[in-house]
Image (spheres, rainbow, N blue to C red):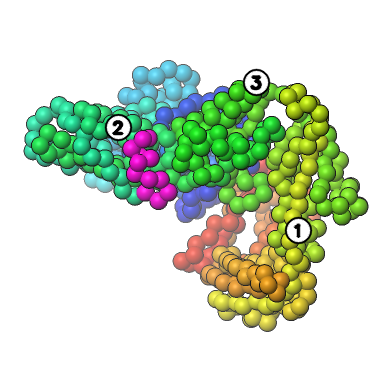
Amino acid sequence: MPPSRLSPSTPPPQRLCSPCASALASSSFNFELSTLNRSVLTPFFSSLCALFSRTATPYLLCLQSLPHSFLSNGGVVPFPAKSLTSYLKVNLSPLAATLTSHLTTVDSKRLTETLTPLDATLTKNEGDCLSLCRRQIQKWLRKVAATRSATTGKCAPGLFSARMNFMWRFQRNCLLVCLGVPLLFAAQADALSAQQTGSNSPQTGSQAQQAGTAALHEIHADGLKTLTEAQVITLSQLQIPSQVGKADLQAAADRLLQTGLFANVNYNYVTKSGEVSVTFRLEEARRVPVYFDNIPWFADSELLDAIKKKLPFCDGTLPEAGAVVDQATEAVNQLLLSHELNVTTEHQLIANPIGEGDVQEFHIQGPSLKIASIEFSDPALASSHVVQQELPNVQGKPYSRMTIDLFLAEQIRPQYLQQGYLRVKLGPPEIHLTGNPNRPLPEQLPVFIPIATGPIYHWKDVQWSGNNVLSTITLTNDIGLKPGEVANGMQIESAWDRIREDYGHRGYLDAKVDPVASYDDQAHTISYNVAISEGPQYKFRTMVLTGISLTDERRLLEVWPIKPGEAFDKTVYEDFLIKLQSHPAQIFGDLPVHYETVGHWLRTDAEKQIVDVLLDFK
């Protein structure tokens, strides 16, 4: 395996790649992190990540995204260590030389100060992963101490140079440390959080001299957007006028953070005349919609009502994780048990199957219920050959709202959009049964889909702003609709994609197209105001390759169609990727190649307006 040739500039990742996401989803081996105060771990993690942040291969990018999701989550996070560790051990060979190279420039004093307390923490724990991490940290510390330069405070050149057999062990251990240390450090987070919060809390002179309690007089909360102050007081479990000390206030702050409703929790308190007033400084966490997957006994409204009885502030959304989500799950379980349904409810954060963002999905484990049939309220669908051809893809499958919703979004909605029914409403699915309502549900469930088509809309016009590279005439022609014509929703959506492709074809990789629809419900027409942000035009600089031989690399660079300094054509780039993955002979000819997948990534520098292509052959 040739060493990776990666330049030292890498923007942070946003999401897990598909292999890591699959590994996470399939694992049943979990650690649980207690709720962390983000302000405690962020400086530590930033320091540790600086050791690895220059590496641009997909595996390490996935690793770096994991701790960031921990820190932004604010709740209890399941972390499947076993499957991901196994995945990494198999796929990390290209990283050896890169890790070795940029560890030679780490500031040794900062490295020592970061790693020494971790060594003490790891010594108190057991387990193969923990021992491996501790051994690697001790090895770093010994090498830093032995080779520190007294004048520069830098590690001496060649500090971590080694043969490939050592580099394999080293890069594997380095990445396991990067993966494991944030988890291991969580054990000390609560104590550190308490110290930090206490140190930031203003105190009077009398408070500094006593560690006693005082009567709680007032509770206030700042920074609220959706919650009320009364709800915060309830969640804190503080009672007026009970006797409280600093430990009680810290415990209340911890309880607020553990709900998952808050990304950050701080507080200050003031004591006067034997009474204490506390103010919580809060930042509410992001919430996501609730999604009920395979609970056919109740309508969504009934399930939400059960959650609201336990959590009055629930408005159809919940945080990404935390105690509140667990309490919502318990509320659904109690509703099911009250109807003698012996099933278990679980929850997980997933990508919205029919929209943008994420949803908090609730599903049950227990009975095997299947979709017997699907019937629509619109009789026109019964005579549609396309619809009838697709129905077998869902009929007979396990009952799942996600399965049904995806079917409606991918197969049914386009049929209406093409006819101008731009505001058609599909579902939610209903279970229609006959007979004794007190009998258990049959295993085969007939599903009924109510459909409200709404009116047919016609095209009116479109207004553009922000476009300089592409003219208004060119953009309007891309839509291909004339005033008065039926507004084909699929054609309109395709037009936005074509415009983005046109900009990418010209090297404007950051171009954004933001269409805002305006409906006239009297005339049944639609018009759009489209704001375009073109961004810079990127020029191609270089290609970085890992995982192929030097002969294959030379061949690939010979046939790469974009010259350095030319405008980067994203369409050409995507066609080239298709050939690499599906038709490698068109690239390499008769040369033997040994790869199954090609990891690909564009590294852009907006300031210099250049882009590098990174390809990782596996």
Q: What residue type is labelled 1?
A: Thr
Q: Quadrant of the N terminus?
A: top right
Residue 301's image quarter?
top right
Residue underneath mark 2 = 238
Residues at marks 2 and 1, CA–CA distance in whole angstroms: 51 Å
Helix, strand or loop for disc 2? loop
Q: What residue type is labelled 2?
A: Leu
Q: What stretch is highlighted in magenta?
A: 224-235
Residue underneath mark 1 = 453
Q: In which quarter of the image is the C terminus?
A: top right
Whole-percent x, y for residue 112 in the image: 30, 35
Residues at marks 3 and 1, CA–CA distance in whole angstroms: 38 Å
Q: Seen in the image, is 617 located left or right of residue 376? A: left
Residue 269 drawn above or below residue 477? above
Could you tell which of marks 2 and 1 lies nearer the N-terminus? 2
At 79% from the left edge and 55% from the top edge, which residue is drawn?
586
The answer to whether any part of residue 514 appears in the image is yes
Residues at marks 3 and 2, CA–CA distance in whole angstroms: 36 Å
Residue underneath mark 3 = 340
